[in-house]
Image (cartoon, rainbow, N blue to C red):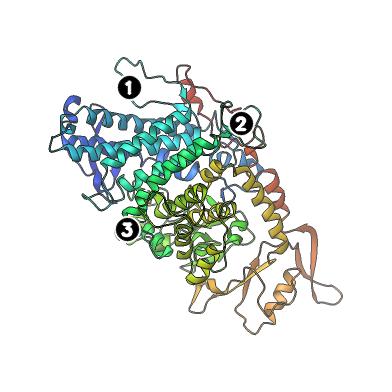
Amino acid sequence: MKSIIKYIIGGMGLLSITSCSDFLDQSSPSEIKGDMVFNSLTFTEQSLNKVYAGLTLDHTYGARIPLNFGFNTDIELVDADVNKPASFTESSERALGNYNGESISGSWSKLDDNWKNCFAIIEDANLVVEGIRSSELFQEGNPARNKMANFLGEALTIRAMVYFDLVKNYGDLPMKFETTKVDGSNLYVAKSDRDDIMEQLLSDLEEAANYLPWAGESGYTTEHATAGFAHGLFARIALAKAGYSIRESSKPGYETLAGSDGTYPTQRPGEAERKLLYERALKHLTAVIGSGVHKLNPSYADQWFQVNQRKLDNTYKENLYEVAHGLNKSGEMGYTIGVRISGASSYYGAKGNSSGKVKLTAPFFWSFDHSDLRRDITCATYELKEENGHIKENMQKNAPFGIYVAKWDIRKMNDEWLNAVRASDAKIGYGINWIAMRYSDILLMYAEVMNELYGADAANPLGGTAMTARTALTEVHSRAFDNKANAQAYVATISSGDDFFNAIVDERAWEFAGECVRKYDLIRWGLLSKKIDQFKEDYRQLTTIAPKYIFYKMKADDEYSIDMSSICWYEYPSFVSEINNELDVKNAIKNAADPNWKYVPGWGTFPNGKIEKDTTTKQEVFKEDGSTSNDSNLSGLTDYVSTGLDKTVKNRHLIPLGSKTISESNGTLANSYGF
């Protein structure tokens, strides 16, 4: 994960560029004829490295795909202020996250940049694929064939990942699996049905899995595409192809989601086709599980500590593939998403702050079992700020849509990162890899597929593993608890079928929050709109049952750190009898045996006002001002949060093509879905 300057093949020559990770450390002559490139292992590898280098850009996997395109959901929200209605439709990721695509289609140039740079990666991958297939080194009997096959497998897999991410976000696309011809005859390509594209990707991944080594073999790390990721990506695409998505027009033989848009229906394949896709996914999931190469890190906390440390896990290999980023070069994991640090500090420097634009919701926090270790590893209900020369944890006041994603935390980052951020007065590339797939995803997809095909407790008819759907779910769920017996008992009581599916829906939320997974799960299940509506109703209910104020203490040996075990999330501490307003809180703390209790406004509704002295009795009284603590939250939730999803076209989860993309397409591309 170290950053180095290297040379990478560009088109038919070589370009000097900056990129990331040790596997891109190459040197070469400044020019070489195209027909010679793929008859050299060195130059072939450099050409492949250019494919990887394209993944590090902000407009691809540095920010756009993992951070800007993957929200909103029922548990995750992009940063927008309910007190500032214009923020939900401004030409930025805020409009995008709230499904107001019409606000960005003609003005947000980042859409054009994403499209252009993703298709540049695909073009570079096409060059590698065609070059290797025609190379003498790839022919049977050539001693270099196995290595060239590895390279081919990587190119096919990365191309599939990028193409699939385009399909997930834009829908139907130009289908271009060949390099651009010299005469330009295939330069302008119209859209193809996304199902045809995904079928080609599945075919490519089937081939790639046979060429690729597993992580840990032949010097391959999880910063390379390996066999495990090719198999896992196959399953992910197969399940998406089997699932729901909004369509440009109705497809014969497809099932239409109830309440779908009349012009742009949300559909999925018929039952027989879905069963076949699930069976195909099962084959590849079984291959990963049966290999024994990838495992869960027994500690969820350590899994994320290593990510923040920019350290590859060579023991468990829980991360099947991670896009390699370079410190001071690329990557916004930990900056745009993560625990918020507000402002400059003497410890982290002039720009050692973070924006924390991706937020989690109060109902999601509330949904965790109280003993689930993932809750506090995932949810940060505080922000950091320097006070008296120390970094202090400050509890958030009533911010039900503003919980930070704690998986990325600058306090867990290594000294190399700290030195880099201290040395700069500008924002830097954090260099933290983006995790494209984890082994827990393999297990939960396996549980979903097995339950759908055979039930929660059936044996796998393919063999290869003794795992059932229930044991797969148990493995993921129980890791999150110190009391394994209680966690296992929870899974044991879930009935096969619909109840088991609903448990998987919940588990995937608890496991993958903030990882750009939830939105696409809900889309394929046909649950995006329903779950967002449910989140809003859950919040309304939460305001009636949650504590009006949150009581907590700072650590006895560290006045700048919250004692997380002291926080009274679900009930008041024993010394509190009744709380109606802030005066009741102050009096309760004043009369408590322990004077160290602190408080902030909670998620429950209480009257706004102020404490003042009664002119007659000289006693403190609370004067209400007629409003309540959650008025703006409730109205903003109804009027602004994710309201674009069903406003103009029902379930319009896709994003529009940028205006420049359309204008430069020579008439072959146009927007759809009412954009």
- Can residue 257 be spotted in the picture? yes
N-terminal of the pair, mark 3 or mark 1, is: 1
Dot label at residue 265: 2
Residues marked 3 and 1 touching at CB (< 8 Å): no
Comparing 122 with 228, the one in front is 228
- Can residue 8 be spotted in the picture? no
Which amino acid, mark 1? Thr
Comparing 147 with 588, the one in front is 147
Q: Residue at x 57, y 47 (%)?
A: 73
Where does the C terminus fall, quadrant-wise?
A: top right
Image: 554 above or below 222: below
N-terminal of the pair, mark 3 or mark 2, is: 2
Q: Quadrant of residue 417?
A: bottom left
Which amino acid, mark 3? Asp
Q: Residue at x 59, y 62 (%)?
A: 396
State the residue position of label 1: 180
